[in-house]
Amino acid sequence: MEAIHLTLRVIHVLFGVFWAGATFMIALFLEPTVREAGPAGGAVMGGMVRRGYTKFISVVALVSVLTGLWLMWRLSGHFSSGFMGSRRGILLSIGMLAGLLALGTGVHMVRKAVTRLAEIGGRVAASGAPPNPEDQAEMARLQGKVRTATRITAVLLLVAVVTMALGPHM
């Protein structure tokens, strides 16, 4: 059983690091750069979607959350009130909740909006003409949604990372 625990812990940490790092990179660098690039930025996002980034990062996030839940279940003695009410239990619960919320925000809001942006961008690129006013308005709305949701996800993951780092020391 110890080998399973250690394996799942390594998977949780590696997938969590990748998820958080990718989210921070997108929030701080890629999204602002794509926005500044205008229509050319849409091609970059479309390429990421075509290469499966949104599906890949969704799976990475889901595996990180599921392994984290399993680890918390084991560590807490099946979510016993004694552990969950301790300083360590409260801190890790905050991280767990932040991770769950980040998963929901990232998968529900970001992935759907990025996929829709890629669809519109592909249609506009195929037409060879600039986007019509309706598409332009929809793209601006979706870009704002991606920007906001990515920032929220990044903050939630920062909370999760900090609480997970501090948890063993409480």
Image (tube, rainbow, N blue to C red):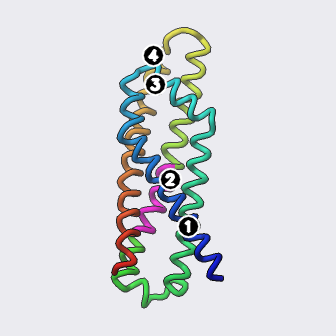
Residue 57, given in percent of the width and then of the height, sits at 56, 48
| The N terminus, quarter of image | bottom right
Q: Which residues are magenta?
A: 95-106
Q: Is label 3 or label 1 in front?
A: 1
- Residue 7 in the figure: left or right of residue 27: right
Q: Is label 3 or label 4 in front?
A: 3
Indicate the secondary structure of the residue bearing disc 1. Answer: helix
Q: Amino acid at mark 4?
A: Pro
Residue that carries the numbered disc 1 in the rendered image: 10
On screen, residue 80 above or below 102? below
Residue 62, given in percent of the width and then of the height, sits at 58, 58
| Count of numbered circles on the image | 4
Query: What residue sits 54% from the left and 55% below the top?
Result: 61
Identify the residue at the far bottom of this view. 82
Residue that carries the numbered disc 4 in the rendered image: 133
| Mark drawn on residue 41 | 3
- Foreground residue among 43 and 115: 43
Q: CA distance from mark 2 to mark 1?
A: 12 Å
Query: What residue sits 36% from the left and 68% below the top?
Result: 163
Query: What residue sits 42% from the left and 83% below the top?
Result: 84
Q: Is the Cβ of the residue at disc 3 closer than 8 Å to that at disc 2?
A: no
Residue 85, given in percent of the width and then of the height, sits at 38, 85
Indicate the secondary structure of the residue bearing disc 4. Answer: helix
Indicate the secondary structure of the residue bearing disc 3. Answer: helix
Q: Is label 1 or label 4 in front?
A: 1
Name which of mark 2 and mark 1 comes first in the sequence: 1
| Mark drawn on residue 18 | 2
Q: Amino acid at mark 2?
A: Phe
| The C terminus, quarter of image | bottom left
Question: Is residue 108 in the magenta section?
Answer: no
